[in-house]
Image (spheres, rainbow, N blue to C red):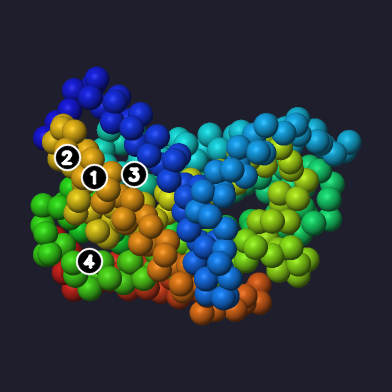
Amino acid sequence: MTFDLAEQLVLFALQYLVVLALGPLLLGLGRRVRARAQGRAGASLLQVYRDLWKLLRKDVVYSESSSWLTRYAPGISFAALLAGIPLIPWLVLPTPLGYIGDLVVLVGLLALSRFIIALAALDAGSAFGGMGSTREMWMGALAEPAFLLVIFAFGGPVGSLQAGVIAASGVALGLAYVHPSLLLAIVAYVLLLLVETGRLPVDNPATHLELTMVHEAMVLEYSGRDLALIEWGQGVKLAMMIGLLAALALPWGLATSWGLVALLVAVGVLALKLAGGHYIVSIFETRLAKWRLFRVADLMTLAVVLAFGSLVLIYMVGGGA
């Protein structure tokens, strides 16, 4: 099924609206699950939206030692995440305007989003910012090679690194798409997701303790609209990571025709995939304690080994399509 340019633009805008709306909801779901696991009622799922609205209406305060970088970094980071949204099959196949880049471009955009915030944390001259940015970039240097190996493992059987092509192949193959190399790549991606989104045991987004802070240490200097963009970006990034896993590992449910019913079904399936994926991750978090920082290297080493094993199965044993 092909779409003309007008239909592609409408679908392009629709997927932006869906992802931007569901991103904060995932953050609220994670907080609610962790609260219930600790015996607390937890805040409403809509509390994140209220917090973002409150921050968007507040003025910002900057350090006297900061430069223009601190002022523009949240917007640049958020824009980099937005640029990666079209590269993921969210609702339909073929992906609207998804041919403009592949998953290597997506890895670069995620790295840019991380790098600009880390650089801004140094710009403010805060000891906390320097500590957090150093840890963030160290973990990013470990995660990016693993991320590349994982996307090569997903794209190898298809011969393409475009997420839309990989997902279309999965839909066409049905259950034959599931094979040992794919399962290894999925496990490696889940480990990578924990690092990229700052979840336990890698980072604790709810802490303000000096010895454990990573992302929180980088954004302590931000307030008002800038902080809202950073927090919203965290929700969008979480949705992107889970949405990409759903598209590559469970591509079924994507619409292949232009129609209201097909799109509504695709939106419902996407919401279930995102909520279900994050619920599982949040439950997994409640069973783990925060690891020492240098144990993150062990986690990424395991991800690299699993992704490399997936590639071996693909190219030497004949795994995949």
Of residue 301 and residue 2, the one placed in the foreground of this image is 2
Look at the numbered discs 2 and 1 and tell me whether their residues touch, using CB distance below 8 Å.
yes
Vertical comparison of 131 with 39: above or below: above
Question: In the displayed structure, does residue 244 sit left or right of residue 28?
Answer: left
**Residue 118 is at least partly visible in this image:** yes
- The residue depicted at 15 percent of the width and 32 percent of the height is 259
* Label 1 vs 3, first from the N-terminus: 3
- Which sits in the foreground, 32 or 186? 32
Q: Residue 238 got which mark?
A: none
Query: Which mark, by number, is residue 315?
Result: 4
- Label 1 sits on a secondary structure element that is helix
Q: Position of residue 207 (x, y in %)?
A: 69, 65
Q: Secondary structure at mark 4?
A: helix
Q: Residue at x 23, y 40 (%)?
A: 264
- Inter-mark Cα distance, 4 to 1: 33 Å
- The first of marks 4 and 2 along the sequence is 2
Distance in Å between CA atoms under marks 3 and 2: 18 Å
Residue receiving disc 2: 262
Image coords of residue 202 (percent x, y): 58, 69
Amino acid type, residue under disc 1 in the picture: Ala
- Place of residue 78 in the rendered image (x, y in percent of width and height, measured from the top left): 56, 38
The x, y position of residue 12, in whole percent, is: 32, 30
Q: Which residue is mark 1?
A: 266
Of marks 3 and 2, which one's residue comes earlier in the chain? 3
User: Counting other residues with Cα less than 10 Å from the Cα at mark 4, is it few (<14), some (14-19), or many (20 or more)?
Assistant: some
Residue 226 visible from this viewpoint: no
Pick the quarter of the image with the N terminus: top left
Query: In front here: 73 or 246?
Result: 246
* Residue, disc 3: 88
Identify residue type, mark 4. Tyr
